[in-house]
Image (spheres, rainbow, N blue to C red):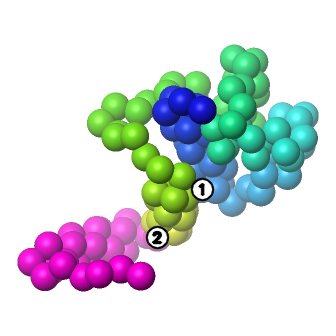
Amino acid sequence: MSTIEKRLGAKISEIRLSQKLTQAQLAERIDVSVETVSRLERGVSVPSLKTIENIAVSLNTSLTVFFDFEGQPPISKKHERELSKLMVFLRTLQTDELSLAHELIKEILNIIKKRPITYK
């Protein structure tokens, strides 16, 4: 499985989660099995252009969103999952809460850089 497949799958997952849809709901909308959606999101399968178009329409987004990888380094599955969870959470915040969360995260990371913490 290539990096582009993983990135495309992560984008599909991120957008689906941000809209609070399950894999089953997306599968129903695009007329495929839940397993197909799972395989696409994990980067195990490569969707056809028609499937990507159906996903974009069902998620009310543009096709270009799925291929906007500029500035993104190759990412592991765990990294993608954590990033998706964070994005879903952040999308629930109001603008002022989002600004505060951003500032807090920056401060926490600055503290960590000064005194590294071992994660378990």
In depth, the one of 49 and 74 nearer the eye is 74
- Pinpoint residue 69: horizontal percent, then vertical percent: 41, 33
Of the 4 image quadrants, the one containing the C terminus is: bottom left
For the record, the magenta segment spans 93-120
The residue indicated by pointer 1 is 18
Q: Which mark is residue 93?
A: 2
Q: Residue at x 85, y 52 (%)?
A: 24
Kindly identify the amino acid type of the residue bearing the numbered disc 2. Leu
- Pinpoint residue 29: horizontal percent, then vertical percent: 85, 40
Reading the chain from its start, which is encountered first: label 1 or label 2? 1
Q: Which mark is residue 40?
A: none
Decide: is 16 above or below 92.
Answer: above
Q: Residue at x 59, y 56 (%)?
A: 18
Q: Is residue 74 left or right of residue 100?
A: right
Quarter-of-image position of residue 42: top right
Q: Is residue 112 magenta?
A: yes
Kindly identify the amino acid type of the residue bearing the numbered disc 1. Ser
Q: Is residue 105 left or right of residue 62?
A: left
Q: SS class of the residue under badge 1?
A: helix
Q: Is residue 73 left or right of residue 66?
A: left
Decide: is 54 above or below 58.
Answer: above
Is residue 29 something that shows in the picture? Answer: no
Camera-near label (1 vs 2) is: 1
State the predominant SS element of the stretch in magenta: helix
Residue sitting farthest toward the left:
114
Q: Crowdedness of circle 2 by 10 Å Cα count: few (<14), some, many (20+)? A: few
Q: Crowdedness of circle 1 by 10 Å Cα count: few (<14), some, many (20+)? A: some
